[in-house]
Amino acid sequence: MASLKKRGKMYYMQYYVGKKKVVRSLGTSSLQIAKEKIRQHESAQFRGEEVAMPTRTPIAEVSALSSET
C-alpha cells in the first residue's frame, strides 16, 4: 500500500518493494489528482500489471527508435 507525501507544492507516492523504500513524484500539486494516481498504481499492482509510471530512457535508445521511422 502506498502512502501520500507532500513536499513543497508537489505530491509524492511512497511505498516499499521488499525492504527497499521507493519514492516517486506524482507530478501534481492537486490532492485529488494525487489520490487518483495512487489508486491507479495500487490497482495495477493488484492486477499484476506493470505500473505505468514515467521511466528514464537512455538517449541512445530514443535516437535508435527515431531513426527507424
Image (cartoon, helix red, strand yellow):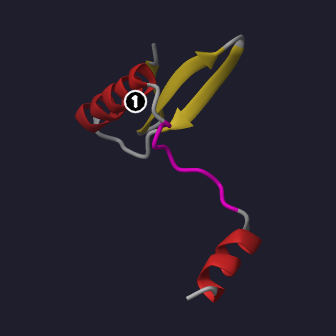
Q: Secondary structure at mark 1?
A: helix
The C terminus - image quarter: bottom right
Residue at 66% from the left image edge and 60% from the top image edge: 57
Residue at 59% from the left image edge and 50% from the top image edge: 55
In the rendered image, the residue lying farthest to the right is 60
Q: Which residue is mark 1?
A: 44
Of residue 59 and residue 64, the one placed in the foreground of this image is 64
Residue 16 location (% of width, % of height): 61, 16
| Majority secondary structure in the magenta region | loop
Residue segment shown in magenta: 50-57
Which image quadrant is residue 4 in?
top left
Residue 25 location (% of width, % of height): 51, 39
The N terminus - image quarter: top left
Q: Is residue 12 above or below residue 58?
A: above
Relative to 60, 12 lies left or right: left
Residue 54: say if magenta: yes
Residue 67: say if magenta: no
Residue 48 location (% of width, % of height): 46, 26
Of residue 42 and residue 12, the one placed in the foreground of this image is 42
Q: What amino acid type should be assigned to the residue bearing mark 1?
A: Ala
